[in-house]
């Protein structure tokens, strides 16, 4: 067994993420502590479309919902069982005790009945009451304040009844009884048997912005996708992570991390844990720079050059150290790829200065798209490119909306969950998705983080401007969108606020928002921006007072000014697009790109160019 020691030291290590682990995570992180949470099972979020089972129909399962690996069926939220391979437990001789264990974030709180009763006064003093068992050293009154806090935190519905030894709490409204339940109640009361609503930790009324309200689907065992029922992950850990992003302690979550040993010092006090990473993937043992260096040197060819391709290298700890070491080997040729803009930080780039070539890979340009798909260059081909974008895999698909957009939505989900939600521990997934839709709807518009925050707040989606900025930066780092700053052509300076946003791939944008007639101008502007970046230009938005030049493109000390317009037939549009460029008093080339077929002539030296012609150069 290879044991790797983490260099990071935590204030607290919490083993397990069930009810106890989740509550400890919430309370201790709010106290400002740096916490590591280790869960033996995988990450689980019932709102994740890939894990959501709620409201699935039996026909969506090959076995109509019957399970082959899950004890309670394929749709049940329980990952685990009565017996788990490699994790035995002992039984007292002659007993048949069965212990169900859930191996997943949140543990068994994902699929329990949500019955939330209090111990009553007599339950704490049973020996004094009936001579059996032992009295607790504490009483109900000692615990009562904490029961109250939990009721308010998790949300429990019920009714105040004043029944002896069944203490009332802070209840949300109970669901109204159904017809047959009213008959039960009526018959039982004739016999002197009280019938009251259950007391369950399910929201019948909204208590915060993180959780939705029960819509009575009767599928609590599948775990609630709107977080209406109490589960440790959705009600304790996720909100704690969200709060930690803003101000309080840090939370580092390790899933598929089975703790095998608690380390202690010479006084017997815990100092750490040893855990097993259960993800059994090819090369999953390569975690650090030392692992990578050792593996490559051991497997290189003996007598010829070895070409090494490393994907997602940013996931390897201190990968720059390995690259610097491997670059000393003349018989190695290294190619590294990554899906995050932080792949080469300033520090690593400095150490590798002069010893690497960085290539940013984009979606296919229009000429590549035509060649790739074997199309004739015409308006129909351009429309396909504007609609579907340039992801290379499209060559394997029929270019129809229902086929392509389904594929692109899956690509989008993969980017969001792998490169953003998981990488940055994002908890407010709904806001992230609403933000992406907002950027798709307002492609090419100038916005600040505050304006975006204010607009989404008007749509009842709340997020502070600094958090909006963080989320946008995550989208930029994942290469989902590009942020384009504004440059003051008069004052010769960059504006500090107000940027435009364009999608790296128009197909993803159209798959999310739709390919709409009224968005032709936005789509055209986006594709012009993408083409300029593809051609190696650094691109900014130009400002002349309150007038705008769509793009200032700079490369090797040379500039190109570009205006984008669907049509310039209207005299006012003609004056606006050419007039803004006329005010720029330098001799660098200036263009107006339009969808019209007329191309090549100039107005005061400003060239008019058709979009197809522009994209082909």
Image (cartoon, rainbow, N blue to C red):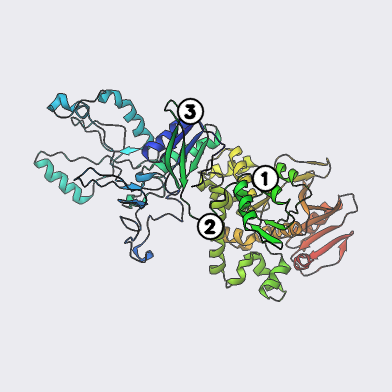
Of circles 1 and 3, which is in front?
Answer: 1
CB under 8 Å between discs 2 and 3:
no
Counting from the top left corner in percent of width and height, residue 391 is at 63, 64
The residue labelled by disc 1 is 321
- Side of 247 relative to 133 (left or right): right
How many residues crowd mark 2 within 10 Å: few (<14), some (14–19), many (20+)?
Answer: few
CB under 8 Å between discs 1 and 2:
no
Nearer-N-terminus badge (2/3): 3
Mark 2 residue element:
loop
Residue 480 visible? The answer is: yes
The residue labelled by disc 3 is 31
Nearer-N-terminus badge (1/2): 2
Q: Residue furthest left?
A: 191
Of residue 478 and residue 592, the one placed in the foreground of this image is 478
Residue 209 visible? The answer is: no
The residue labelled by disc 2 is 282
- Side of 324 relative to 22 (left or right): right
| Alpha carbon distance from label 1 to label 2 | 22 Å
Counting from the top left corner in percent of width and height, residue 111 is at 33, 48
From this view, report whether residue 187 is shown above or below residue 512: above
From this view, report whether residue 203 is shown above or below residue 412: above
From this view, report whether residue 13 is shown above or below residue 99: above
Mark 1 residue element:
helix
């Amino acid at each position: 067994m290879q044991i790797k020691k983490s260099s990071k030291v935590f204030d607290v290590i919490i083993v397990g993420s069930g009810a106890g682990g989740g509550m400890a995570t919430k309370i201790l992180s709010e106290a400002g502590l740096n916490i590591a949470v280790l869960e033996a099972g995988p990450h689980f979020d019932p709102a994740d479309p890939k894990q959501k089972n709620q409201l699935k129909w039996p026909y969506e399962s090959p076995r109509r919902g019957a399970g082959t690996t899950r004890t309670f069926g394929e749709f049940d939220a329980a990952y685990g069982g009565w017996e788990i391979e490699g994790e035995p437990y002992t039984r007292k001789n002659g007993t048949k005790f069965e212990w169900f264990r859930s191996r997943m974030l949140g543990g068994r709180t994902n699929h329990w009945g949500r019955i939330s009763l209090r111990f009553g006064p007599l339950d704490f003093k049973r020996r004094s009451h009936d001579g059996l068992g032992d009295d607790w050293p504490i009483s109900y009154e000692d615990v009562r304040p904490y029961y109250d806090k939990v009721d308010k935190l998790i949300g429990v519905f019920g009714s105040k009844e004043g029944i002896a030894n069944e203490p009332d709490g802070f209840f949300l409204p109970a669901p109204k009884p159904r017809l047959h339940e009213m008959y039960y109640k009526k018959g039982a009361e004739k016999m002197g048997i009280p019938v009251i609503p259950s007391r369950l930790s399910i929201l019948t009324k909204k208590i915060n912005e993180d959780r939705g309200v029960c819509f009575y689907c009767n599928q609590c065992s599948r775990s609630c996708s709107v977080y209406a029922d109490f589960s440790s992950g959705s009600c304790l850990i996720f909100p704690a992570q969200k709060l930690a992003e803003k101000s309080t302690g840090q939370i580092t979550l390790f899933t598929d991390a089975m703790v095998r040993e608690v380390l202690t010092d010479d006084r017997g006090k815990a100092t750490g844990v040893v855990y097993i990473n259960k993800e059994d993937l090819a090369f999953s043992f390569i975690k650090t720079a030392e692992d990578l260096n050792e593996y490559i040197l051991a497997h290189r060819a003996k007598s010829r050059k070895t070409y090494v391709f490393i994907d997602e290298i940013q996931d390897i700890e201190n990968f720059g150290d390995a690259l610097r070491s491997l670059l000393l080997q003349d018989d190695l040729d290294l190619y590294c790829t990554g899906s995050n803009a932080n792949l080469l930080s300033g520090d690593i780039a400095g150490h590798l200065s002069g010893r690497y070539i960085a290539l940013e890979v984009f979606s296919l340009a229009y000429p590549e798209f035509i060649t790739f798909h074997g199309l004739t260059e015409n308006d129909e081909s351009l429309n396909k490119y504007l609609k579907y974008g340039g992801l290379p895999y499209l060559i394997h698909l029929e270019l129809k909306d229902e086929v392509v957009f389904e594929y692109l939505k899956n690509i989008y989900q993969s980017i969001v969950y792998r490169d953003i939600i998981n990488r940055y521990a994002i908890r407010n997934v709904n806001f992230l998705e609403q933000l992406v839709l907002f950027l798709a709807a307002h492609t090419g518009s100038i916005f600040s983080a505050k304006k975006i925050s204010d607009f989404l707040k008007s749509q009842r989606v709340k997020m502070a401007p600094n958090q909006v900025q963080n989320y946008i930066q995550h989208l930029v780092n994942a290469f989902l969108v590009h942020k384009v700053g504004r440059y003051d052509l008069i004052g010769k300076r960059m504006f500090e606020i107000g940027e435009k946003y364009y999608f790296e791939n128009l197909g993803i944008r159209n798959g999310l928002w739709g390919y709409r007639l009224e968005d032709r101008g936005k789509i055209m502007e986006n594709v012009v921006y993408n083409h300029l970046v593809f051609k190696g230009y650094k691109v900014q938005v130009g400002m002349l007072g309150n007038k705008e030049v769509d793009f200032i493109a700079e490369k090797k000390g040379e500039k190109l000014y570009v205006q984008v317009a669907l049509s310039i037939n209207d005299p006012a549009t003609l004056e606006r697009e050419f007039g803004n460029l006329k005010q720029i008093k330098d001799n660098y080339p200036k263009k107006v790109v339009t969808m019209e077929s007329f191309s090549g002539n100039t107005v005061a030296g400003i060239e008019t160019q058709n979009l197809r012609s522009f994209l082909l150069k």
